[in-house]
């Protein structure tokens, strides 16, 4: 199966590909690149599908952000008690 790349770099997934991978309207897909090959796989509905949905000023340290969120949660719980 083939798909042509548009001027904007877009492709249309052939119906047979969508059917076999159970890709429906609104489904997120992940691109996996290894060497000179690329795979398209359904991304599921996990947290990784949210990547890019919030604007940030630069690279983020996930561990530090997670730790900060956990500390804020503890402070809020303690303030309520």
Image (cartoon, helix red, strand yellow):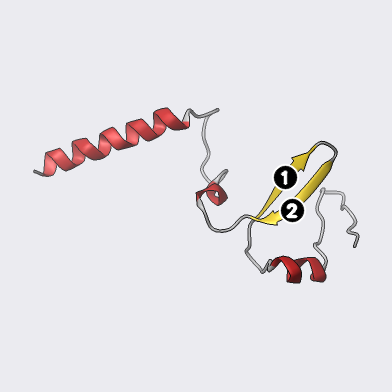
Residue occupying image coordinates x 63% and y 62%: 27
Instruction: List the single residue furthest toward the left.
Output: 81
Crowding near pointer 2: few (<14 within 10 Å), some, many (20+)?
A: few
In the depicted view, which residue is nearer to us: 54 or 50?
Answer: 50
Residue 39 placement, left or right of 48: right
Q: Height in image: 44 above or below 71?
A: below
Q: Is residue 72 above or below residue 19?
A: above
The image quadrant of residue 12 is bottom right
Q: Residue at x 80, y 53 (%)?
A: 10
Task: Check disc 1 and report its element: helix, strand or loop.
Answer: strand
Q: Is residue 77 left or right of residue 28?
A: left
Give the CA separation, mark 2 to mark 1.
6 Å
The residue to which callout 1 is attached is: 32
Q: Position of residue 37 (x, y in %)?
A: 83, 43
The residue to which callout 2 is attached is 40
Residue 6 position, x and y percent, is 87, 53
Marker count (numbered)? 2
Query: What residue do we see at 81% from left, 70% from top?
Result: 16
Contact? badges 2 and 1 (CB < 8 Å): yes
Label ID, residue 2: none
Helix, strand or loop for disc 2: strand
Q: Which badge, 2 or 1, comes first in the chain's sequence?
A: 1
Percent coordinates x, y for residue 42 in the rendering: 66, 58
The image quadrant where one finds the N terminus is bottom right
Classify the position of the C terminus by image quarter.
top left
Q: Residues within 10 Å of mark 1 (few under 14, many from 20)?
A: few
Q: In the figure, is residue 47 to the left or right of 12? A: left
Q: Nearer the viewer, residue 56 or 63?
A: 63
In the image, residue 26 sits, relative to residue 10, either above or below, namely: below
């Amino acid at each position: 199966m083939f798909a042509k790349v548009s001027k904007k770099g877009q492709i249309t997934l052939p119906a047979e590909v969508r059917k076999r991978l159970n890709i429906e309207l609104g489904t997120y897909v992940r691109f996996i690149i290894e060497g000179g090959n690329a795979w398209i796989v359904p991304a599921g509905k996990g947290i990784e599908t949210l990547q890019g949905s919030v604007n940030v000023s630069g690279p983020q340290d996930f561990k530090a952000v997670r730790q900060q969120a956990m500390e804020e949660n503890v402070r809020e719980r303690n303030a309520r008690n």
